[in-house]
Amino acid sequence: MNDKTRRDLRQANQTTTQAEPPKITFPCDYPIKVVGDAVEGFVDMVRATVSRHDPSFDPQRIEVIDSRNGRFQSVRFTIRATGEEQLKALFHELKASGLVHMVV
């Protein structure tokens, strides 16, 4: 291999430096599933948190599913996502509650 055919791998490849199109086009309907402890107030906490991040959210459209042994609950809903920052803030606040194990 001569010097002309070598390339410096530390240099960014032109194909990797091109801007990638966004994976999600905002605004959009965005389904979310929250899994947490099946304790009193869990679903109400999820409703209140989501309502703060999406004023158009309809709390009556939440679907709650209990785990087989009743220890956990899965809360499913759809919000009107306006941007990545909104989603990050919502996920962070849900996880910070201490009751949420997973947000998908």
Image (cartoon, helix red, strand yellow):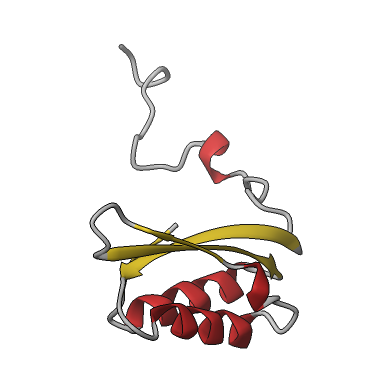
Residue drawn 29% across and 64% down? Answer: 72
Residue drawn 54% across and 87% down? Answer: 48
Residue 101 occupies which quadrant of the picture?
A: bottom left
Residue 95: give x, y in percent of width and height: 35, 76
| Quadrant (top left/top right/bottom left/bottom right) for the C terminus | bottom left
Residue 67 occupies which quadrant of the picture?
A: bottom left
Residue 92: give x, y in percent of width and height: 42, 77
In this rendering, is residue 39 above or below 28? below
Q: Nearer the viewer, residue 18 or 34?
A: 34
Taking 76 as reference, is 22 left or right? Answer: right
In this rendering, is residue 27 above or below 18? below
Residue 76: give x, y in percent of width and height: 53, 61
Taking 6 as reference, is 17 left or right? Answer: right
Residue 80 occupies which quadrant of the picture?
A: bottom right
In this rendering, is residue 57 above or below 8? below
Q: Nearer the viewer, residue 36 or 60?
A: 60
Residue drawn 45% across and 77% down? Answer: 43
